[in-house]
Image: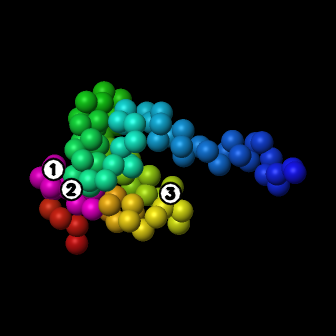
Amino acid sequence: MISKRSASSRKRARWSQRVTRQSNALDLEPGVFALDDPRAIARSLKASAESSRRRKTTPFRSAMSMLNFYLNRAGRGLPARQRARLEAAKDELRVLFGRPPAR
């Protein structure tokens, strides 16, 4: 059976996976977004952002940006429990960086 999607469209569809894996901003711990504990996700992102020499902004903004990127790209396919865990990781990131909570 022949797929309706061409090879080039499949390649384009995976660009976000490549960005997550080979980001120019952060070197992420493998599987960081699949961790069960929101605090562990936030700690890993914080460590990655603080150790990165390639980031273009503050460690907080780099870490939050990568987390938001992952949430936005995962879209509707992300299970509700994982989405809730990642949303909670945003709050944990704010706490770890000493930022006020989201409104």
Assess disc 3: are there few (<14), some (14-19) or many (≥20) residues with their C-alpha within 10 Å of its C-alpha.
some
Q: Secondary structure at mark 3?
A: helix
Picture layout, residue 84 above or below residue 67: below
Residue ID for mark 2 = 92
What residue is at 43 percent from the left and 33 percent from the top?
24
In the image, is residue 3 above or below residue 22?
A: below
According to the picture, the residue beneath numbered tag 3 turns out to be 74
Left or right, 64 with respect to 11, comes to: left
Mark-to-mark CA distance, 1 and 2: 6 Å
Q: For the residues marked 1 and 3, what is the alpha-carbon distance in whole angstroms? A: 24 Å
In the image, taking residue 13 as reference, residue 31 lies left or right, namely left
Q: Position of residue 3 (x, y in %)?
A: 82, 51
| Magenta region, residue range | 88-99
Identify the secondary structure beneath mark 1: helix
Query: Which callout, 2 or 3, points at the residue further toward the start of the chain?
Result: 3
Is label 2 in a helix, a strand or a loop?
helix
Mark 2: amino acid: Glu
Q: Amino acid at mark 3?
A: Ala
Residue 70, image x, y percentages: 44, 52
Question: Where, by quadrant of the figure, is residue 85 drawn?
Answer: bottom left
Rendering colour mode:
rainbow
Residue closest to the eye, 35 or 42:
35
Contact between labelled residues 2 and 1, with CB atoms less than 8 Å apart? yes
Q: Residue at 48% across / 61% down in the picture? A: 78
Q: Is residue 5 visible?
A: yes
C-alpha span from label 2 to label 3: 20 Å
Q: What predominant SS class does the magenta segment belong to?
A: helix
Identify the residue shown where x is 29% and y is 43%.
Answer: 45
